[in-house]
């Protein structure tokens, strides 16, 4: 259990600040994460790792010469926002381009991709390398859908060393993808992890059992089985990883990581290593600078994972290269650096914006602000319920992410309203704040959807029911284009698309806006409940599809709840008076 905290909502931010102070000789805090204390004397590729908090030493703990140039740090188990990724990249960029590298999770993919587009548009060459090492999360035929777990460490290390050696962006990206293609990991959990402030773990295992195939966000294993003696566990891990041996280099040399997930002590890992290492050597492999310890954790989870990377001469050169970081040091590092002084000039995302809007639009903006206030209040009281639903087959953070996002959206909207914003500008500002503070897949989707809603709504005048229906459609289309989900995939789209279609149809038929919205919300609520019988085809719940059967999708549930609650605000007079 995580026992040392103040306000649980501030845990990740306070941990990052404390880390940066404790290791101020190597790192400095910037908006969205941390970067190296010293900038390179000459331009080099900036390798930026990132993801949610709770995995230390990943990701900030490996910032330093020979490894990462920066880390984007999201909330616990939650994707950082695109703004955070952009900010860290701007601070770390030294003129030779940027590469983001991270585990294959939908929220991370979306947010880092949007940050990459923004950086590229500004003339900064940017690329992305996704890690997909977890053999338990998808079959070999769908390896591109696999999530990234402890294999992150090998891929990040190779890329960081290559960049330190002066290779160009294309070469660093090539080596990262090569390392990923030759890396395999299997993990197991003995007990679940507990969020700060939570009174119970994200999942529980019966006494004397383990869950095989866990992820690093507290996702339950693919199946539970009796916890065997260390020798049998070691054999099982080795057997499963070697069964996925890639078309490997002929060197017969392996980088090996036996990783602890947070509460498994080094002594236990050494007992396990006593079985793992001989089995790998008996299989004909030479073990190159193996690592046994905590490198990619999951808060206080008890568990372990085994990672193998099949090396060739090129990969081995960078795997064994020196590194100097707060959490990981290898060999002697020599590097030229100059004090950074201050970060590069950053855009002031909180800068005042002057708005001008019509009196009608500003009056309707007040109703939109009330809708966001209602949303934030509803999600606060529903946080635990949504988190419990998400923990069945996901990582249990949906409720917390929705609370953070809706609160940030309301605060940003209130500030925009005070500055005279019309309804469209207010909702666009709310969407940007939601995406920035919530993180994760739902965060980026809700944020992008709100911005699209606001852009379609506009500031010119109070919307007619037809314009309101068009705004709902813009919300749905934007989320569909980002998430690539359809009805039946067991996502928020299972509630959103029925709502949009129902509302459009009723408005077109001349139904009063308030009645149309209420009926559409009822349709969405029924659709969300019916997701209980579906198997998830998208998102983090997909690898554990069977576990979610019988439980409605939390994203669809929260969307239906919110849309039902905000209807009176969006459809109240003077909108209703136009019908």
Image (cartoon, grey):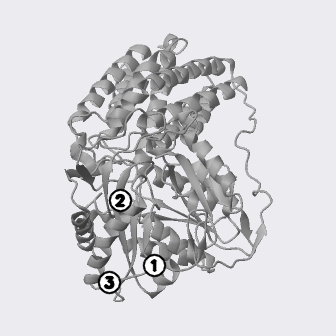
**SS at circle 3:** loop
Q: Residue at x 41, y 32 (%)?
A: 199
**SS at circle 1:** loop
Q: Quadrant of the N terminus?
A: top left
Q: Which residue is mark 3?
A: 285
Question: How far apart in space, not on screen, are marks 3 and 2 (Cα)?
Answer: 21 Å
Q: Which residue is mark 1?
A: 289
Q: Residue at x 23, y 49 (%)?
A: 209
Which sits in the foreground, 75 or 407? Answer: 75
Q: Which residue is mark 2?
A: 304
Of the numbered discs 3 and 2, the one sitting upstream in the chain is 3
Image coordinates for residue 110, horizontal then vertical, percent: 48, 52
Q: Are marks 3 and 1 in contact (CB under 8 Å)?
A: no
Question: How far apart in space, not on screen, are marks 2 and 1 (Cα)?
Answer: 19 Å
Q: Are marks 2 and 1 in contact (CB under 8 Å)?
A: no
Q: Is residue 38 visible?
A: yes
Image coordinates for residue 210, horizontal then vertical, percent: 25, 51
Left or right: 82, with 494 as reference point: right
Left or right: 516, with 100 as reference point: left
Q: Residue at x 30, y 47 (%)?
A: 220
Q: Residues within 10 Å of mark 3 (few under 14, many from 20)?
A: some
Question: How far apart in space, not on screen, are marks 3 and 1 (Cα)?
Answer: 13 Å
Image coordinates for residue 517, horizontal then vertical, percent: 40, 20
Which sits in the foreground, 464 or 148? Answer: 148
Q: Is residue 133 visible?
A: no
Q: Residue at x 59, y 27 (%)?
A: 410
Q: Residues within 10 Å of mark 1 (few under 14, many from 20)?
A: some
Relative to residue 365, is residue 190 depicted above or below?
Answer: below
């Amino acid at each position: 259990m995580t026992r040392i905290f103040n306000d649980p909502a501030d845990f990740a931010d306070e941990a990052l600040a404390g880390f940066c102070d404790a290791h101020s000789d190597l790192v400095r805090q910037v908006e969205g994460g941390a970067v190296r204390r010293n900038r390179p004397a000459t331009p080099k590729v900036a390798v930026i790792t990132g993801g949610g908090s709770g995995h230390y030493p990943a990701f900030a703990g490996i910032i330093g010469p020979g490894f990462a140039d920066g880390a984007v740090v999201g909330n616990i188990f939650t994707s950082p926002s695109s703004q955070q990724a952009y900010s860290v990249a701007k601070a770390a960029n030294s003129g030779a381009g940027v590469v983001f590298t991270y585990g294959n999770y939908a929220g991370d993919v979306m947010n880092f991709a949007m940050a990459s587009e923004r950086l590229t548009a500004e003339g900064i060459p940017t690329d992305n390398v996704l890690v997909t090492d977890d053999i338990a999360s998808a079959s070999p035929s769908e390896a591109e859908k696999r999530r990234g777990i402890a294999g992150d460490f090998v891929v990040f290390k190779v890329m960081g060393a290559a960049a330190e050696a002066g290779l160009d962006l294309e070469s660093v990206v090539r080596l990262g993808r090569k390392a990923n293609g030759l890396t395999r990991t299997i993990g197991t959990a003995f007990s679940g992890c507990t969020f700060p402030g939570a009174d119970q773990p994200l999942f529980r295992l019966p006494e004397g059992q383990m869950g095989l195939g866990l992820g690093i966000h507290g996702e339950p294993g693919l199946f539970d089985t009796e916890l065997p003696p260390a020798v049998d566990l070691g054999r099982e891990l080795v057997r499963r990883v070697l069964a996925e041996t890639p078309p490997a280099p002929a060197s017969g040399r392996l980088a090996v990581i036996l990783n602890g997930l947070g509460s498994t002590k080094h002594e236990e890992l050494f007992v396990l290593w006593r079985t793992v290492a001989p089995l790998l050597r008996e299989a004909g492999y030479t073990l190159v600078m193996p690592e046994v310890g905590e490198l990619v954790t999951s808060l206080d989870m008890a568990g372990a994972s085994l990672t193998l990377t099949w090396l060739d001469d090129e990969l081995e050169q960078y795997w064994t290269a020196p590194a100097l970081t707060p959490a990981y040091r290898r060999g002697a590092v020599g590097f030229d650096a100059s004090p950074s002084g201050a970060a590069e000039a950053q855009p002031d995302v909180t800068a005042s914006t002057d708005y001008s809007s019509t009196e009608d639009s500003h009056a309707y903006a007040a109703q939109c602000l009330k809708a966001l206030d209602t949303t934030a209040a509803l999600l606060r009281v529903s946080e635990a319920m949504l988190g419990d639903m998400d923990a069945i087959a996901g990582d249990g953070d949906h409720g917390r992410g929705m609370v953070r996002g809706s609160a940030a959206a309301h605060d940003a909207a209130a500030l925009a309203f005070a500055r005279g914003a019309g309804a469209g500008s207010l909702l666009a500002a709310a969407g940007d704040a939601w995406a920035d503070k919530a993180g994760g897949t739902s965060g980026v989707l809700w944020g992008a959807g709100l911005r699209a809603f606001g852009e379609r709504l506009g500031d010119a005048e109070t919307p007619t029911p037809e314009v309101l229906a068009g705004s709902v459609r813009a919300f749905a289309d934007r989320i569909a284009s980002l998430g690539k989900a359809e009805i039946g995939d067991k996502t928020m789209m299972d509630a959103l698309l029925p709502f949009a279609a129902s509302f459009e149809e009723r408005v077109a038929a001349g139904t009063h806006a308030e009645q149309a919205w209420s009926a559409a919300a009822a349709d969405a609520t029924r659709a969300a409940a019916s997701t209980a019988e579906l198997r998830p085809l998208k998102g983090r719940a997909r690898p554990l599809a069977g576990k979610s059967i019988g439980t409605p999708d939390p994203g669809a549930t929260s969307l239906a709840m919110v849309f039902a609650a905000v209807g009176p605000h969006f459809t109240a007079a003077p909108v209703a008076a136009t019908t």
